[in-house]
């Protein structure tokens, strides 16, 4: 019987895709979380808190950082608030779709850049840093999950963010919703 051997790089790629596209144990992925957000909600600003649109911009920025490091660019860095969070004013339909598309394209490009890599790549030091690619790739996964949680909270705080038009239709608890049945 042939033994199943899974490379660490393949497991990391699986985690990256699950956090981004779906299928992870933790709940909605990044794309699942942003897909039904309207531009008005994406750009809604609360005092002292980044908007959903800014979070999406920021997540794209750090994917680009990872890509540049994989491409060997030691001097590439994110130095300013504008580079990190963008300079987003009002978010219209076009701007919101563009931000989501850029995030998806950056994810696809990241996945493509890892396609030919093997486990030895994970031990290489990231150009311009003191840490390895294993740490950087796990870092981008953790970064996605952290900001995805923020997006989820901002969605819940936003007016009309609920999938229920009438709050009377909303289950009082997930244990009593129709999704889970009566076994709880």
Image (cartoon, rainbow, N blue to C red):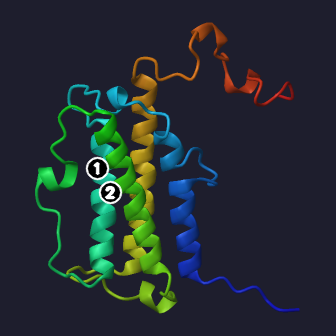
Q: Which residue, given by chain and number where applicable, does mark 1 sit on?
A: 57
90 relative to 105 in the view: left or right: left
* Residue indicated by mark 2: 60
Front position in the image: 183 or 107: 107
| Residue shown at the point (49%, 34%) measured from the top left | 36
Quick check: 184 left or right of 95?
A: right
Residue 171 image offset from top left, x and y in percent: 67, 17
Q: Is residue 136 left or right of residue 108?
A: left
Across and down, in percent, residue 30 comes to: 48, 48
Residue 104 appears in which quarter of the rendering? bottom left
Whether residue 52 is visible here, answered yes or no, is: no
Image point (16%, 56%), residue name: 83
The reply to whether residue 33 is in sight is yes
Q: Secondary structure at mark 2?
A: helix
Distance Cα–Cα, label 2 vs label 1: 5 Å
- The label number, if any, that marks residue 150 in the structure image: none
Q: Residue at x 21, y 48 (%)?
A: 85
Label 1 crowd bin: few (<14), some (14–19), many (20+), radius 10 Å:
many
Pointer 2: residues within 10 angstroms few (<14), some, or many (20+)? many
Contact (Cβ within 8 Å) of mark 2 with mark 1 = yes
Residue 14: x percent and y percent? 58, 68
Closest to the observer, 150 or 158 = 158
Position of residue 87 relative to residue 125, above or below, is: above
Q: Is residue 115 left or right of residue 173?
A: left
Image location of residue 98, percent across then percent down: 33, 47
| Residue 37 falls in image quadrant | top left
Which residue sits at x=68%, y=26%? 174
Q: Residue furthest left?
A: 80
The quadrant of the image that shows the N terminus is: bottom right
Marks counted in the figure total 2
Label 1: state its secondary structure: helix
């Amino acid at each position: 019987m042939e033994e199943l051997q899974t490379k660490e790089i393949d497991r990391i790629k699986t985690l990256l895709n699950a956090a981004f596209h779906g299928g992870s144990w933790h709940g909605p992925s990044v794309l699942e979380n942003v897909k039904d957000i309207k531009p008005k909600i994406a750009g809604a600003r609360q005092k002292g808190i980044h908007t959903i649109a800014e979070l999406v911009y920021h997540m794209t920025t750090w994917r680009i950082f990872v890509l540049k490091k994989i491409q060997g660019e030691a001097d590439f860095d994110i130095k300013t608030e504008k580079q990190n969070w963008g300079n987003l004013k009002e978010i219209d339909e076009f701007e919101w779709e563009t931000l989501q598309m850029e995030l998806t394209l950056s994810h696809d490009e990241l996945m493509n850049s890892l396609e030919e890599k093997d486990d030895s790549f994970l031990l290489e030091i990231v150009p311009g840093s003191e840490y390895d690619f294993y740490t950087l790739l796990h870092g981008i996964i953790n970064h996605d999950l952290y900001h995805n949680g923020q997006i989820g909270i901002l969605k819940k705080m936003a007016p009309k963010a609920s999938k229920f038009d009438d709050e009377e239709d909303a289950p009082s608890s997930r244990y009593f919703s129709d999704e889970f049945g009566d076994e709880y």
